[in-house]
Amino acid sequence: MRRGMNFVGLLVWLIAAQLMGCATGGNVDFDEAMDASAEEEAPLGGEALARRRLDLVRAWRDLLHFDETMQSLVDRRDSRSVALLDGFLDQYMTEHLDPMLRPMWQSTHPEVMALDANLRFMKAQILADMRYPRRVQQSIEDIEIRFEGRESMLVEYPVGEQRALGEALEILRERKWNS
Protein backbone atom coordinates (compact mmCIF):
# COMPACT_ATOMS: atom_id res chain seq x y z
CA MET A 1 0.00 0.00 0.00
CA ARG A 2 2.80 2.39 0.92
CA ARG A 3 4.59 1.59 -2.36
CA GLY A 4 1.43 2.57 -4.30
CA MET A 5 1.18 5.85 -2.39
CA ASN A 6 4.83 6.65 -3.19
CA PHE A 7 4.20 6.02 -6.87
CA VAL A 8 1.12 8.27 -6.86
CA GLY A 9 3.05 10.94 -4.98
CA LEU A 10 5.91 10.76 -7.46
CA LEU A 11 3.49 10.93 -10.38
CA VAL A 12 1.77 14.01 -8.90
CA TRP A 13 5.17 15.63 -8.29
CA LEU A 14 6.27 14.97 -11.91
CA ILE A 15 3.05 16.41 -13.31
CA ALA A 16 3.36 19.48 -11.08
CA ALA A 17 6.99 19.97 -12.12
CA GLN A 18 6.04 19.67 -15.76
CA LEU A 19 3.23 22.21 -15.36
CA MET A 20 5.57 24.60 -13.56
CA GLY A 21 8.08 24.26 -16.39
CA CYS A 22 5.39 25.01 -18.93
CA ALA A 23 4.19 28.03 -16.97
CA THR A 24 7.65 29.54 -16.53
CA GLY A 25 9.48 28.68 -19.72
CA GLY A 26 6.80 27.84 -22.23
CA ASN A 27 7.15 31.01 -24.28
CA VAL A 28 10.88 30.58 -24.76
CA ASP A 29 10.44 27.05 -26.12
CA PHE A 30 7.62 28.21 -28.40
CA ASP A 31 9.76 31.04 -29.78
CA GLU A 32 12.66 28.65 -30.37
CA ALA A 33 10.32 26.22 -32.15
CA MET A 34 9.05 29.06 -34.35
CA ASP A 35 12.63 30.07 -35.21
CA ALA A 36 13.49 26.44 -36.03
CA SER A 37 10.48 26.08 -38.34
CA ALA A 38 11.40 29.34 -40.08
CA GLU A 39 14.93 27.99 -40.62
CA GLU A 40 13.50 24.82 -42.17
CA GLU A 41 11.60 26.91 -44.71
CA ALA A 42 14.66 28.97 -45.68
CA PRO A 43 16.45 27.92 -48.88
CA LEU A 44 19.57 25.90 -48.30
CA GLY A 45 23.00 26.41 -49.80
CA GLY A 46 26.39 24.74 -49.84
CA GLU A 47 26.70 21.52 -47.88
CA ALA A 48 23.11 21.65 -46.60
CA LEU A 49 21.81 21.90 -50.18
CA ALA A 50 24.00 18.99 -51.26
CA ARG A 51 22.66 16.92 -48.35
CA ARG A 52 19.05 17.81 -49.26
CA ARG A 53 19.72 16.83 -52.86
CA LEU A 54 21.07 13.45 -51.69
CA ASP A 55 18.02 12.96 -49.48
CA LEU A 56 15.71 13.72 -52.41
CA VAL A 57 17.62 11.33 -54.69
CA ARG A 58 17.43 8.61 -52.03
CA ALA A 59 13.69 9.16 -51.60
CA TRP A 60 13.27 9.01 -55.41
CA ARG A 61 15.05 5.65 -55.56
CA ASP A 62 13.01 4.37 -52.62
CA LEU A 63 9.77 5.33 -54.35
CA LEU A 64 10.90 3.67 -57.58
CA HIS A 65 11.56 0.43 -55.70
CA PHE A 66 8.27 0.67 -53.80
CA ASP A 67 6.41 1.19 -57.07
CA GLU A 68 8.12 -1.82 -58.67
CA THR A 69 7.29 -3.93 -55.64
CA MET A 70 3.66 -2.79 -55.68
CA GLN A 71 3.34 -3.59 -59.40
CA SER A 72 4.89 -7.02 -58.86
CA LEU A 73 2.52 -7.84 -56.00
CA VAL A 74 -0.49 -6.67 -58.01
CA ASP A 75 0.63 -8.74 -61.01
CA ARG A 76 0.92 -11.81 -58.76
CA ARG A 77 -2.47 -11.01 -57.19
CA ASP A 78 -0.96 -11.17 -53.72
CA SER A 79 -3.63 -9.13 -51.94
CA ARG A 80 -2.32 -9.83 -48.45
CA SER A 81 1.14 -8.48 -49.32
CA VAL A 82 -0.40 -5.52 -51.17
CA ALA A 83 -2.33 -4.63 -48.01
CA LEU A 84 0.83 -4.86 -45.90
CA LEU A 85 2.83 -2.76 -48.34
CA ASP A 86 -0.05 -0.27 -48.52
CA GLY A 87 0.12 0.26 -44.76
CA PHE A 88 3.89 0.60 -44.83
CA LEU A 89 3.82 3.09 -47.72
CA ASP A 90 1.18 5.21 -46.02
CA GLN A 91 3.35 5.43 -42.91
CA TYR A 92 6.53 6.06 -44.96
CA MET A 93 4.90 8.92 -46.85
CA THR A 94 3.43 10.48 -43.72
CA GLU A 95 6.55 10.25 -41.57
CA HIS A 96 9.38 10.64 -44.08
CA LEU A 97 8.34 11.84 -47.51
CA ASP A 98 5.77 14.52 -46.67
CA PRO A 99 8.08 16.42 -44.26
CA MET A 100 10.82 16.30 -46.90
CA LEU A 101 8.46 17.75 -49.53
CA ARG A 102 6.93 20.40 -47.26
CA PRO A 103 9.35 23.34 -47.86
CA MET A 104 8.23 25.62 -50.68
CA TRP A 105 11.71 26.81 -51.63
CA GLN A 106 12.81 23.49 -53.13
CA SER A 107 10.05 23.66 -55.73
CA THR A 108 11.71 26.80 -57.14
CA HIS A 109 15.40 26.18 -56.46
CA PRO A 110 17.12 25.38 -59.78
CA GLU A 111 19.27 22.59 -58.33
CA VAL A 112 16.47 20.54 -56.76
CA MET A 113 13.17 21.59 -58.37
CA ALA A 114 13.20 18.78 -60.95
CA LEU A 115 13.81 16.20 -58.22
CA ASP A 116 11.07 17.79 -56.14
CA ALA A 117 8.62 17.58 -59.05
CA ASN A 118 9.61 13.98 -59.88
CA LEU A 119 9.09 12.95 -56.24
CA ARG A 120 5.66 14.55 -56.19
CA PHE A 121 4.63 12.73 -59.37
CA MET A 122 5.96 9.43 -58.06
CA LYS A 123 4.12 9.92 -54.77
CA ALA A 124 0.90 10.56 -56.70
CA GLN A 125 1.48 7.48 -58.85
CA ILE A 126 1.94 5.28 -55.78
CA LEU A 127 -1.19 6.79 -54.21
CA ALA A 128 -3.05 5.94 -57.43
CA ASP A 129 -1.73 2.38 -57.20
CA MET A 130 -2.99 2.28 -53.61
CA ARG A 131 -6.41 3.47 -54.88
CA TYR A 132 -6.55 6.77 -53.01
CA PRO A 133 -8.05 9.09 -55.66
CA ARG A 134 -8.70 11.90 -53.17
CA ARG A 135 -5.06 11.96 -52.08
CA VAL A 136 -3.95 11.76 -55.72
CA GLN A 137 -6.12 14.81 -56.42
CA GLN A 138 -4.49 16.63 -53.50
CA SER A 139 -1.07 15.79 -54.97
CA ILE A 140 -2.16 17.07 -58.38
CA GLU A 141 -3.37 20.34 -56.86
CA ASP A 142 -0.12 20.67 -54.90
CA ILE A 143 1.91 20.21 -58.10
CA GLU A 144 -0.24 22.75 -59.95
CA ILE A 145 0.22 25.35 -57.21
CA ARG A 146 3.94 24.82 -56.71
CA PHE A 147 4.85 24.70 -60.39
CA GLU A 148 2.38 27.25 -61.75
CA GLY A 149 3.71 28.85 -64.91
CA ARG A 150 6.31 26.11 -65.46
CA GLU A 151 4.15 23.65 -67.39
CA SER A 152 6.94 23.20 -69.98
CA MET A 153 9.47 22.02 -67.37
CA LEU A 154 10.60 18.44 -68.05
CA VAL A 155 9.69 15.79 -65.48
CA GLU A 156 10.16 12.05 -65.44
CA TYR A 157 6.60 10.82 -65.58
CA PRO A 158 5.67 8.12 -66.33
CA VAL A 159 8.88 6.63 -65.00
CA GLY A 160 11.48 6.23 -67.73
CA GLU A 161 9.94 8.93 -69.95
CA GLN A 162 10.45 12.67 -69.93
CA ARG A 163 7.47 14.89 -70.56
CA ALA A 164 6.48 18.48 -70.02
CA LEU A 165 4.96 19.00 -66.58
CA GLY A 166 1.59 20.02 -68.05
CA GLU A 167 1.41 16.87 -70.16
CA ALA A 168 2.49 14.72 -67.20
CA LEU A 169 -0.31 16.24 -65.11
CA GLU A 170 -2.85 15.21 -67.75
CA ILE A 171 -1.50 11.64 -67.70
CA LEU A 172 -1.67 11.61 -63.91
CA ARG A 173 -5.27 12.88 -63.92
CA GLU A 174 -6.20 10.05 -66.28
CA ARG A 175 -4.33 7.50 -64.18
CA LYS A 176 -6.08 8.64 -60.98
CA TRP A 177 -9.27 6.89 -62.10
CA ASN A 178 -7.75 4.02 -64.08
CA SER A 179 -5.62 2.39 -61.37
Image: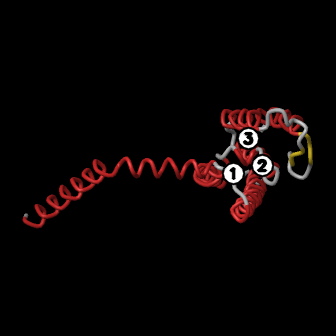
Report how far apart the C-alphas of labels 2 and 1 lie in the structure.
8 Å
Left or right: 28, with 155 as reference point: left
| Image location (x, y in percent) of residue 10 | 18, 62
| Image location (x, y in percent) of residue 109 | 78, 49
Marking on residue 112:
none
**Which residue was labeled with disc 3?**
128
Q: Quadrant of the C terminus?
A: top right
What amino acid does circle 2 point to?
His
**Which residue was labeled with disc 2?**
109
Residue placed furthest toward the left = 2
Q: Is residue 16 visible?
A: yes
Q: Does residue 178 sit above or below 60 in this rendering? A: above
Colour scheme employed for the rendering of this structure: secondary structure
Report how far apart the C-alphas of labels 3 and 1 lie in the structure.
31 Å
Secondary structure type for disc 1: loop
Report how far apart the C-alphas of labels 2 and 3 lie in the structure.
27 Å
Which residue is rendered at x = 73% and y = 44% of the image?
Answer: 129
What amino acid does circle 3 point to?
Ala
| Image location (x, y in percent) of residue 163 | 92, 43
Q: Residue 137 falls in which quadrant of the image?
A: top right
Q: Of circles 2 and 3, which is in front?
A: 2
The reply to whether dot 3 and dot 1 touch (C-beta < 8 Å) is no
Which residue is nearer to you in this view: 73 or 28?
Answer: 28
Which residue is rendered at x = 24% and y = 52% of the image?
Answer: 20
Which residue is nearer to you in this view: 177 or 91?
Answer: 91
Q: Residue 49 falls in which quadrant of the image?
A: bottom right
**Which residue was labeled with disc 1?**
43
